[in-house]
Image (cartoon, rainbow, N blue to C red):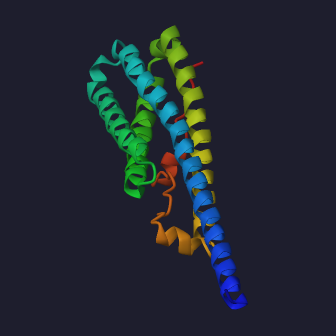
Amino acid sequence: MAIGAIIILAVLGAVLLFGIGIYNRLIATRNEFKNAFAQIDVQLRRRYDLIPNLVETAKGYLAHERETLEAVIQARNNAQSAAGDASARPENGASIAALGVAEGALTGVMGRFFALAEAYPDLKADQSMQELMEELSVTENRIAAARQQFNDAGTAFNNFREQFPNNLVSALFGFNRAALLEIEDPHMRETPKLSFS
């Protein structure tokens, strides 16, 4: 075998090994953002479990506010469904975007619920309501932290995926851009104000 052929084979082998390294790193960073979404999913499920208890506790005090209570449950159900879709495919940008929209709607209706509940001193004084509000507040903080971790992991994946020559390998093997979990309406980015003390 000629020295030229050996050099060509060595270069091709080095390129192949380099490509395998990039591919493996793409897999690792994609799995990191999928795992980060799993952490969001855990906290969202916790919130979805708390909301019906909160509404049930408030029902006795807000019986004539049935429309608001039903809106909360409907928004919760929509968000829960969107979270299920996103959980099954966290790499799907459309699923993540739909979850962001559903979460924005839930945050908005929960804000109206809390504003309405503020007007009822007996409800504010209810021990069960106070405990649920505290649990929900802690959960909201955990969701925000998990969402930040997910977005950080997605950004790291996107940065690695888009750098040269990684972009060649990612295009060859169909590694799509990771969608970040963002809430569209800026005033809905805020955690609902919880002041039942």
State left or right for residue 29 relative to residue 75. Answer: right
Q: Quadrant of the N terminus?
A: bottom right
In the figure, is residue 47 to the left or right of 160? left
Residue at 68 percent across and 80 percent down: it is 11
Q: Is residue 69 above or below residue 189?
A: above
Identify the image quadrant of the C terminus: top right
Left or right side of 8 for 70 = left
- Kindly tell me whether residue 164 is visible in this rendering: no
**Residue at (52%, 36%) from the top-left corner?**
192
Position of residue 3 relative to residue 81, above or below, is below
| Residue 184 position in % (x across, y down) | 45, 55
Q: Is residue 53 above or below residue 17?
A: above
Residue 124 coordinates in the image, percent (x, y): 50, 16
- Asked whether residue 41 is in view, the answer is yes
Q: Residue furthest top?
A: 127
Give the residue furthest to the front. 1
Point out residue 13 in the picture as x, y percentages from the top left corner.
Answer: 65, 74
Q: Quadrant of residue 195?
A: top right
10 vs 155, nearest the viewer: 10
Identify which residue, 96 or 178, lies in the foreground: 178
Q: Position of residue 67 (x, y in %)?
A: 27, 29
**Can you say whether 124 is above or below 14 in the image?**
above
Q: Residue at x 54, y 15 (%)?
A: 131
